[in-house]
């Protein structure tokens, strides 16, 4: 019985008015004050000493508790409290990790439009294929409808005579690809864009930047089309510019 009283007295000593929490809270304030005013350094040292004293008291009390529990053959309770605390923290961490992610609504992606410009074909094709053509959640009839809603001008003229039906979607897409997915024509269109760049008549940083960007962009696209020998293709393109339309079609 006396051991239980001793353990209780060790665990619950008389509380001082100056608690460890107060000491810990005061220490950062004292540190900031000491940094701004050298005269506050002694006060900082006092607060640090107080906190160190509380740490030593805590360690002493913890040792006393363990010794008392050993005498009572109840040291397993101390270990169990530690395991319970660790398990509680682990459970809280797991709950946070397993909490569902907050759904953030993304902006709706608009279907691309295409009116027949060779310069816009690859961009249109890639986006349309990703959103519609390869979408397994829709049928060919819906794909055909979406395709027609994206087209205008020369592009629409290629497929407008094809009846709208699920069976004809593949035919319409093939006709559009044959007409515009021609690597030689695409490369020639991007070379034409380079030749069409207006000459720079005076020193101008914006004009020079625009030329560099236009040059890099179109050369990169031409290489992406598989034109490895750019110099030979450039000579061919310059020669074909002076030929009549019938001869050009034979190429």
Image (cartoon, grey):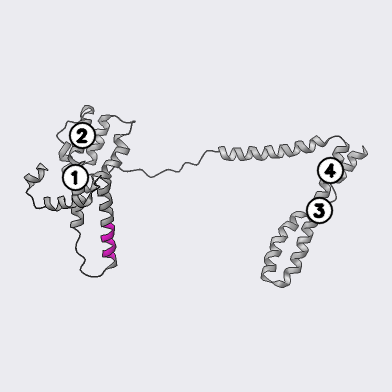
Residue 65 badge: 4
Q: Which residue corresponds to the image point at 81% horizontal and 46% vertical from the top-left?
A: 62
Instruction: State the residue position of label 2.
Output: 174
Q: Tags 4 and 1 in contact by the CB under 8 Å rule?
A: no
Q: Tags 2 and 1 in contact by the CB under 8 Å rule?
A: no
Tell me where the magenta segment starts and ends, as one range.
Answer: 206-214
Q: Residues within 10 Å of mark 4 (few under 14, many from 20)?
A: many
Q: Nearer the viewer, mark 4 or mark 1?
A: 1
Instruction: State the residue position of label 3.
Output: 56
Q: Earlier in the sequence, mark 4 or mark 2?
A: 4
Q: Earlier in the sequence, mark 3 or mark 1?
A: 3
Compare residues 180 and 72 and report the one nearer the observer: 180
Q: Which residue corresponds to the image point at 88% horizontal and 37% vertical from the top-left?
A: 71
Asked which secondary structure carries label 1, the reply is: helix
Q: Quick check: 175 above or below 206? A: above
Q: Residue furthest right?
A: 2
Asked which secondary structure carries label 2, the reply is: helix
Q: Residues within 10 Å of mark 3 (few under 14, many from 20)?
A: few
Instruction: State the residue position of label 1.
Output: 184
Q: Quick check: 206 above or below 219? A: below
């Amino acid at each position: 019985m006396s051991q239980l009283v001793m353990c209780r007295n060790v665990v619950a000593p008389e509380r001082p008015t100056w608690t460890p929490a107060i000491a810990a809270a005061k220490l950062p304030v004292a540190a900031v004050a000491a940094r701004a005013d050298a005269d506050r350094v002694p006060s900082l040292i006092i607060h640090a000493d107080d906190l160190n004293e509380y740490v030593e008291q805590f360690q002493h009390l913890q040792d006393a508790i363990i010794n008392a529990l050993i005498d009572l053959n109840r040291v397993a309770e101390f270990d169990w409290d530690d395991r319970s605390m660790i398990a509680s923290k682990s459970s809280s961490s797991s709950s946070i990790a397993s909490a569902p992610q907050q759904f953030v609504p993304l902006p709706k992606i608009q279907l691309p439009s295409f009116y027949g410009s060779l310069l816009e074909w690859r961009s249109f094709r890639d986006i349309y294929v990703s959103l519609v053509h390869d979408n397994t959640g829709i049928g060919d009839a819906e794909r055909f409808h979406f395709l027609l809603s994206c087209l205008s001008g020369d592009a629409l003229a290629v497929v407008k005579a094809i009846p709208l039906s699920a069976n004809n979607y593949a035919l319409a897409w093939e006709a559009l690809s044959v007409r515009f997915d021609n690597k030689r024509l695409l490369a020639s269109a991007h070379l034409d864009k380079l030749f069409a760049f207006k000459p720079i008549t005076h020193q101008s940083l914006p004009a020079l930047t625009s030329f560099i960007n236009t040059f890099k962009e179109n050369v990169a696209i031409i290489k992406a089309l598989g034109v490895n020998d750019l110099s030979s293709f450039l000579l061919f393109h310059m020669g074909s510019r002076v030929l009549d339309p019938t001869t050009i079609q034979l190429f």
